[in-house]
Amino acid sequence: MTDTDIKKGLAGVVVDYTGVSKVNPDTNSLLYRGYPVQELAATQSCEAVAHLLWTGELPTDEQLATLRETERENRALQPDVKAAIDLIPLDAHPMDEVRTAVSVIGARETRGTLNVMDAVGTPQQNLERSIRLFGELPAIVAYGQRRRRGLEPVDARDDLDYAANFLWLTFGEEADEVVVDAFNRSMILYAEHSFNASTFTARVITSTLSDLYSAVVGAIGALKGPLHGGANEAVLHIFDEIGSAENVSAWLDTALAEKRKIMGFGHRVYKRGDSRVPTMKAALDTLVAHYDRPDVAALYDALESEFVARKGIYPNLDYPSGPAYNLIGFDTLTFTPLFVAARVVGWTAHIMEQQSSNALIRPLSAYNGADERHIEGYVPDTSAIDVQERPEEAAE
């Protein structure tokens, strides 16, 4: 086997079919169940897009009303989840809170299933679990930010749509419509993206016949990494370093000389720019105008212009979403948990798809370690059964 046979990071390897989403190379557009995501973000609610990803179709009015009713029944921050979050040090990363919270929810919901196969669940049970996580995660993410600010949790409201309630839970006041709209769009844009690292992690775990909650916990762990979900946090750290548009050129000189990775630019899949960026940039522009922050737009435009001119690498979704979340009032550490709250829809859609036509995901590896060697003085026990002579008793 040669180095060219090894696909590091599984680059270019197609491992399965999916009907959940794809990037259309002809239009450079991300499609959710066939719909361009920019059209969905411009016209649909988070709840409607969740229904689409889970079921394959946009909901009827009746189906949307039913989904909203169920989601609102699951909005409360449960006492056991709050107690678990409160045990986590305040200086731990909030992704640790989210990961722990989902574990607690999973343990509660699958209790009594000591036979692990019983925890796998039926398609209907897993749809219900998906809606439950979709409903509970906003309270979990919001409480994480509030407790770091020394604030008590806010009770969920059942008279607000998903995005508006999320902002209410976080800030304790109703957000202006322009803010709700920008936030709703961001959550739709982050909801799904084919076999990315965290989604593939969820599918690998699911392929072992583990339960949905375990798969989501694994996906959260993958998303925590700065090369995946943590990139939107890194964008704000870069903005903080630069300070203002006038400093971009000198900052970029130093960063490139030091061979730093500039987060928020480039993408493993898109070669002509992330198709989600124009929609999120438009949402950011509305927030810049709403909060009267032209300095943010100036810094954004200056860094994008300089970096594209020098490297020919374009922004990805994290680049506009970072400053957008900052303007709304989210702490930088909350950005990746927001990603979790959005992407849980895509994860669970893939988990259910994997379960519907499962094959254990078990790739091979090419060994490049030491040649076979033996312990000096070791004498094998010849009385042991040679499984090669008794294949009917052998098992992997």
Image (tube, grey):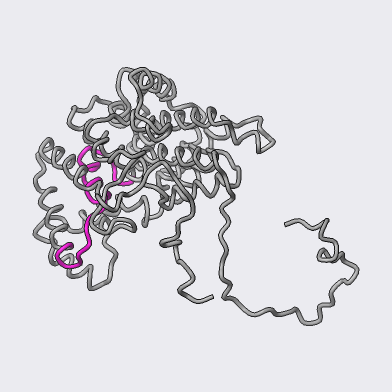
Question: In the orientation shown, which residue stands out farthest toward the right?
Answer: 383
Q: Quadrant of the C terminus?
A: bottom right
Residue at 56% x, 59% y is 363
Residue at 29% x, 29% y is 45
Residue 391 spot, x, y in % from top left = 81, 60
Residue at 28% x, 40% y is 37
Q: Quadrant of residue 145?
A: top left
Considering only vertical position in the picture, is 250 above or below 267? below
Residue 293 falls left or right of residue 381: left
Q: Quadrant of the N terminus?
A: bottom right
Residue 395 spot, x, y in % from top left = 76, 56
Number of numbered discs:
0
Q: Quadrant of residue 307?
A: bottom left
Considering only vertical position in the picture, is 298 above or below 365? above
Residue at 82% x, 63% y is 387
Residue 136 spot, x, y in % from top left = 43, 30
Q: Nearer the viewer, residue 77 or 57?
A: 57
Question: In the orientation shown, which residue stands out farthest toward the front?
Answer: 26
Q: Nearer the viewer, residue 65 or 95?
A: 65
Magenta run includes residue 328: yes
Magenta run includes residue 47: no
Residue 378 falls left or right of residue 88: right
Question: In the orientation shown, which residue stands out farthest toward the bottom?
Answer: 376
Q: Which residues are magenta?
A: 308-333
| Main SS, magenta residues | helix
Q: Nearer the viewer, residue 184 or 270?
A: 270
Residue 60 spot, x, y in % from top left = 34, 22
Q: Nearer the viewer, residue 34 or 114?
A: 34
Residue 143 falls left or right of residue 370: left
Considering only vertical position in the picture, is 127 above or below 28? above
